[in-house]
Image (cartoon, rainbow, N blue to C red):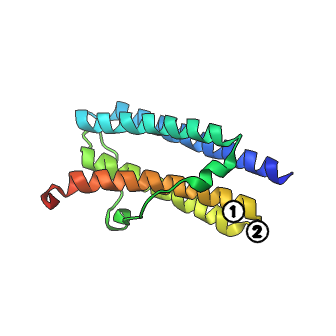
Amino acid sequence: MTRKKDIENLLAMAIRRERDAGEFYRNLEQQVANAAAKAVFAQLAQDELGHERFLETCTSNPTMLAKFEPGPDFHVTATTDLPPLTPDMKPVDAIVLAMKKEEQAVELYHGFAARTADAKLKATFEGLAKMELGHKNRLETVFVNIGYPEVF
């Protein structure tokens, strides 16, 4: 398998993961009763569709991933527990669930990067990790704004 083929396969896997994440959020949207939580999951499903489309454009230009700037990792997920999925899930719990899912994706891609000696594959994995970290960062910002309104 060529390096180009490896990168194509890697991006195909990442696209499937984004598609699966979108489906996950659409399913959650159907399961929860809280209107605000439904809205959060609907928006996340739309976001994942955007991520999927972005990755599809990266198949013709994988270097686009290297330009992705996620911003800082606030490590909010380190201080939050994974909430149980319930029909009456609150919006803040929905955000926590999504943050944890994005954190898992960051860890997955960092792990892949650490296990490859191929510089181009490593750069692609790191770019994917940065993209997922950007998603996590956005959710952490929303969480802080919802979960800690006294800050304002």
Q: Nearer the viewer, residue 109 or 87?
A: 109
Amino acid under disc 1: Lys
Q: Say which residue appears at 39% left-offset and 49% top-offset.
A: 98
Disc 2 + disc 1, Cβ < 8 Å? yes
Mark toward the start of the polypeptide (2 vs 1): 2
From the top left corner, tell me how far across and down residue 35 is, in percent.
24, 32
> For the residue labelled by badge 1, is the local secondary structure a helix, a strand or a loop?
helix
What residue is disc 1 on? 122
Crowd tier of the residue under label 1, counting other residues whose Cα lies within 10 Å: few below 14, some 14–19, many 20 or above: many
From the top left corner, tell me how far across and down residue 49 is, in percent.
50, 34
From the top left corner, tell me how far across and down residue 135 is, in percent.
44, 50
> For the residue labelled by badge 2, is the local secondary structure a helix, a strand or a loop?
loop
C-alpha distance separating marks 2 and 1: 7 Å
Apparent side of residue 93 relative to residue 113 in the rendered image (left or right):
left
Apparent side of residue 2 relative to residue 107 in the rendered image (left or right):
right
From the top left corner, tell me how far across and down residue 125 is, in percent.
64, 58
Amino acid under disc 2: Ala
Q: Say which residue appears at 81% left-offset and 47% top-offset.
A: 5
Residue 113 picture quarter: bottom right
Q: Residue furthest right?
A: 1
Crowd tier of the residue under label 2, counting other residues whose Cα lies within 10 Å: few below 14, some 14–19, many 20 or above: few
- Which mark, by number, is residue 42? none
As displayed, is residue 138 above or below residue 117? Answer: above
Q: Say which residue appears at 61% left-offset and 65% top-offset.
A: 111
Q: State which quarter of the image contains the C terminus.
A: bottom left
What residue is disc 2 on? 117
As displayed, is residue 102 above or below residue 86? Answer: below
